[in-house]
Amino acid sequence: MDLSSLSQFAQIVGNVAVVLALCFGMAQIRQFRRQRHDAAAIELMRSIEDQQFTHAFHLIYPLPVDMPVEDFRALGPDYEEAALALGARFESMGLLVYRDSLPMHLVEEIIGGAVVLLWQRLRPWVEANRREQGHPLLFEWFQWLAERFEERGRPTQVPAYDRFRRWTPKR
């Protein structure tokens, strides 16, 4: 084997190594994204499984849609504290979805219906507070998130227990 042949062989080996490194790098990036997605799902679940969230949900969910703000305030400070707790939680989620830190479809599957239903119940209170406080940004991302889910048809989607009735584990 002469020097020219060795040079060509080395160039081929180098090119193959570069291609393999690129493939490996792409696989690593995909794996990292999957891990980030899984971590986001776990954190999302943790954020809605604590006692404060459960208590707030328990107070607000049974209320009628578009309840007049005066009637809502007459329920007492526990209800306004619950509204603040839920609003702050969904405010963070909305911003994280907007910034692609939380995948929209994941948040929608886990809690999308609740976001829409709770926004419908809290909207009059939020809007009144915005006017009274001169703070139009109050819970802006909560509203944004609920409106995106409504646009995606979340309130009318077929429930998961029907959509995935025939699902079986892959393993």
Image (cartoon, rainbow, N blue to C red):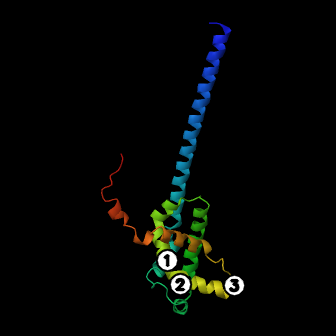
Do callouts 2 and 1 mark residues in contact (Cβ within 8 Å)? no
The residue singled out by tag 2 in the image is: 79
Which amino acid, by three-letter code, is at mark 2?
Tyr
Which badge, 1 or 3, is on the more N-terminal residue?
1
Q: Secondary structure at mark 2?
A: helix
Neighbour tally class for label 3: few under 14, some 14-19, many 20 plus, Cα within 10 Å:
few
**How far, Cα to Cα, is label 1 from label 3?**
23 Å
Q: Residue at x 61, y 66 (%)?
A: 95
- Image check: 14 left or right of 57? right
- In the foreground, 108 or 75: 108
Q: Secondary structure at mark 1?
A: helix
The residue singled out by tag 3 in the image is: 134
The residue singled out by tag 1 in the image is: 118
Neighbour tally class for label 1: few under 14, some 14-19, many 20 plus, Cα within 10 Å:
many
In the rendered view, tell whether residue 75 sits above or below residue 54.
below
Neighbour tally class for label 2: few under 14, some 14-19, many 20 plus, Cα within 10 Å:
some
- In the foreground, 137 or 84: 137
- Counting from the top left corner in percent of width and height, residue 46 is at 52, 63
Residue lying furthest right: 134
Q: Secondary structure at mark 3?
A: loop
- In the foreground, 157 or 165: 157
Which badge, 2 or 1, is on the more N-terminal residue?
2
Do callouts 1 and 3 mark residues in contact (Cβ within 8 Å)? no
Residue lying furthest left: 166
In the rendered view, tell whether residue 22 sits above or below residue 157.
above
Q: Residue at x 55, y 80 (%)?
A: 83
**How far, Cα to Cα, is label 2 from label 3?**
22 Å
Of badges 2 and 1, the one in the foreground is 1
Which amino acid, by three-letter code, is at mark 1?
Leu
Q: Please state the total of marks drawn on the protein image.
A: 3
